[in-house]
Amino acid sequence: MSGRPRPAERRFWELVNGPWCDPRLDPYDDCWMWMGGRSPARRPKSQPNHKPYKQYGRFHWPLPGFPKHLINAARAALILTVGPPPDGDDLSPTYVAGHRCDTSLCAHPGHLDWQTQQQNTFKSTGAVRA
Ligand SMILES: [Zn+2]
């Protein structure tokens, strides 16, 4: 079965605005924006002054028994290109798909890295201070 594209693959890239949609986009440097469903940008009620949360793309990723399961679009981009997180679990809670470009709706695999939750939180905190 190896080498056979996962069925999700074609469905995924149809939802990404890459250079195949817009030839003005640089295939390496420009972000490829997610055009599918996304998470709501809401702030916690207890913290009305909190800046709105970053929005993340959501991609339909059916699981046995959970046909409507959704995963982060950036996670799907990495699974479909570089493969699952270092621990081998597609849905690993340990690893997140971190954005090097800091554009939460970007699905460019070259802008993404598997990071532990801890690395990702550290980076976000740094970004807020900068
Ligand atoms: Zn990007």
Image (tube, rainbow, N blue to C red):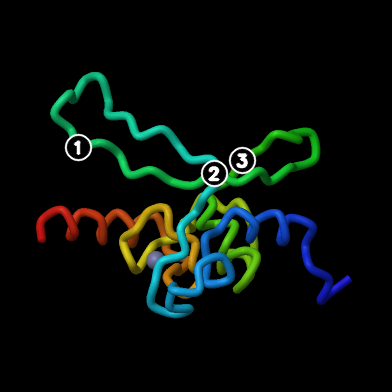
Q: Mark 2: is the Cβ under 8 angstroms from ligand 1?
A: no
Residue at numbered disc 2: 58
Asked whether the residues under the numbered discs 1 and 3 touch, taking CB atoms below 8 Å apart as contact, a structural biologist would say: no
For label 1, the crowd category at 10 Å Cα-Cα, with few meaning under 14, some 14 to 19 and many 20 or more, is: few
Q: Give x and y (percent) for residue 80.
A: 65, 65
Indicate yes or no: mark 3 CB to ligand 1 under 8 Å. Answer: no
Category of crowding for the residue at label 2, using alpha-carbon neighbours closer than 10 angstroms: few (below 14), some (14–19), many (at least 20): many
Which residue is tagged 1? 51
Task: Say what secondary structure mark 3 lies in.
Answer: strand
Q: Is residue 49 above or below residue 99?
A: above
Label 3, residues with CA under 10 Å away: few <14, some 14-19, many ≥20: some
Name the one closer to the observer, 40 or 115.
40
Q: Amino acid at mark 1?
A: Lys
The one of 111 and 115 positioned closer to us in this rendering: 111
Residue at 27% x, 29% y: name it: 43
Which residue carries the number 3 mark? 70
Q: Can you name the residue that lies furthest to the left here?
A: 129
Tag 2–tag 3 contact (CB < 8 Å): yes
Question: Left or right: where does residue 106 sit relative to residue 15?
Answer: left
> Ligand 1 sits in which quadrant?
bottom left
Coordinates of residue 112 in the picture (x, y in percent): 45, 68
Label whose residue precedes the other's in the sequence (1 or 3)? 1
**Label 1, label 3: how many angstroms apart (C-alpha)?**
25 Å
Q: Is residue 67 above or below residue 103?
A: above
Q: Position of residue 84 (x, y in %)?
A: 62, 65
In this rendered view, identify the residue nearer to me: 27 or 91. Answer: 27
Q: Amino acid at mark 2?
A: Arg
Regarding mark 2 in the picture, which secondary structure is present there? strand
Q: Nearer the viewer, residue 129 or 23?
A: 23
Q: Position of residue 122 (x, y in %)?
A: 25, 58
* Amino acid type of the residue tagged 3 in the rendering: Leu
Sequence-first tag of 2 and 3? 2
